[in-house]
Amino acid sequence: MLRVENLNAWYDRSHVLQGISLEVKKGEIVTLMGRNGAGKTTTLRSLMGLLPKKEGKAFIDGVSFLNLASHERYHLGLAYVPEDRRIVPGLTVKENLELGVIAQKSRGDMGVMVDEIAETFPRLKERLQQDGASLSGGEQQMLAIARALIAKPKVILLDEPSEGIMPVLVDEMFELFAKLKDDGITILLVEQNVQQALKISDRAYILDQGEIVFEDTAQNLLSNDEIQQKYCAV
């Protein structure tokens, strides 16, 4: 569903990504692991078209997109949930959700779409008329994910979804990801909570200094303490 070949990316003159290649098959959760500064977020931002300078190839469902604008990638079925969530203050939960479909070229009944996604997120269903910015950190993260999912993307890019969230909500969130996987949603996940991420993932790649240095099934990496300690320990 998502294939990346020899992706390079820069921040100004800093060459951050140095030829990474990866793939995410339909219905998989694949985790990008590595220490802070390894290039994980840069990978997602590059795929979403948020960096001005990049080279390589990337395909979603066989369609090349690396030279397309961000909104064109969205129309191809690529969704992005950034680490800072980007909940719009002054808009209700319902209105924030509507932003996820308002730019679609063709869409169904917006009210029906909001109702459907709210069923997947019971906490949000109870708060549809509440200001989105007034939600707790965990609830805002749920809203950001729901806003990305409402348009039914082919691939969702998730950047550090458990960052700054209470443990009880982290557990709930990873249960949600496992359910989304069962429903056939394809996810490329960046996550510092290595154990939780690997438990729900199919495969994982490890980034170090802008390069992929290791890849394996999530099950194998979960039991490989040596690799985790070498590349992921703080």
Image (cartoon, helix red, strand yellow):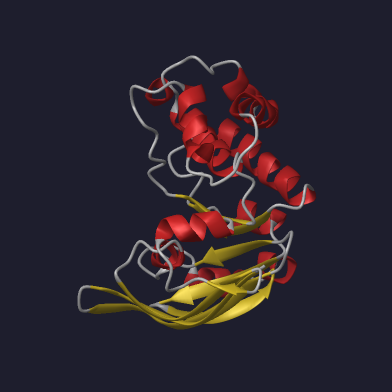
Q: Position of residue 165 (x, y in %)?
A: 48, 36
The extreme right residue here reads 182
The residue shown at (66%, 59%) is 198
Q: Position of residue 116 (x, y in %)?
A: 69, 29
Numbered marks: total: 0
Left or right, 121 with reference to 44: right
Give above or below for 2 relative to 8: above
Left or right, 19 with reference to 169: left
Q: Nearer the viewer, residue 191 or 231?
A: 191
Quadrant housing residue 112: top right
Give above or below for 180 relative to 198: above
Left or right, 97 with reference to 201: left
Give above or below for 187 relative to 32: above
Residue 191 seen by the camera: no
Q: Position of residue 228 (x, y in %)?
A: 56, 69
The residue shown at (54%, 52%) is 193
Q: Nearer the viewer, residue 234 or 72?
A: 72
Q: Position of residue 152 (x, y in %)?
A: 64, 46
Residue 31 seen by the camera: yes
Where is the N terminus found, in terms of image quarters? bottom right
The residue shown at (71%, 68%) is 25
